[in-house]
Amino acid sequence: MRLILASLLAATAIATPIVAQQMPGSKNTAAITGGTYTADANHTLVKWEVNHFGFSPLWGLFGQVTGTLVLDPNNPAASKVDVTIPVSKMATAVPGFTAHLLRDGKDGGKPDFFGSAPADAKFVSTSVVMDDDGDEAKVSGNLTLNGITKPVTLDVDFYGAGKAPPQMGGKENVGFEAGATIKRSDFGLGYAVPLVSDEVKLEISAAFQK
């Protein structure tokens, strides 16, 4: 019994610092500091989703996003974002599906989707319209995808800000969730429309550091 109690006490002593530690980030806009942030490529993801034949949703992810975000807490509407998304790094859970998205056309023909050497996608903001609470915004900009540039507006929600612990680098962090719907045919990606929906739903988890 003494051995069991000693083990429990030791386990509690080890776990206590972890349990007691609080989240370094908070959903408090006052925690946002101004300046130029760099996209956190390890924690920024873009999920895309289409309707497959009306049977099920089909989705994949873009990652390894790079770029910058300029923030001024005293003038949020002046914020600017410029990010690059490597299409060649796209991932799905099905190797055959991923290969289809990134394969060349037959006998030198046009690929069904991106091809084996796709150009990076890019989003550059042109305007930011904040809501009254200062934690939501409509961010309009130009999206370049598959070599074609079109205007897109993102619905953006502030997720959290704060300073990372020293053991995690100690950098200032800020994060957002965003969403939009685009038509893939607008970007020359209309293969199998309408059996696979033209509309593509985008869900974005965006993390930035400075």
Image (spheres, rainbow, N blue to C red):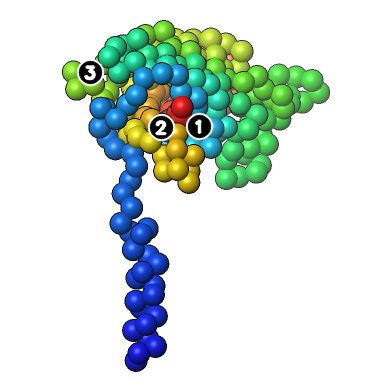
The residue shown at (66%, 42%) is 96
In the image shown, does 174 or 193 lie closer to the viewer? 174
Identity of the amino acid at label 1?
A: Asp
Q: Is 203 above or below relative to 15?
A: above
Rounded to the nearest angstrom, the CA distance separating label 3 from label 2 is: 22 Å
Rounded to the nearest angstrom, the CA distance separating label 1 from label 3 is: 25 Å
Disc 3 element: loop
* Residue 54 x/y as whole percent: 44, 36
For the residues bearing labels 2 and 1, Cβ distance under 8 angstroms: yes
Q: Identify residue for label 3.
A: 131
Q: Quadrant of residue 162?
A: top left
Q: Is 158 above or below relative to 16?
A: above
Q: Identify residue for label 2.
A: 173
Identity of the amino acid at label 2?
A: Asn
Task: Mark 2: give few (<14), some (14-19) or many (20+) Cα within 10 Å.
Answer: many
In the image shown, does 201 or 158 lie closer to the viewer? 158
Disc 2 element: strand
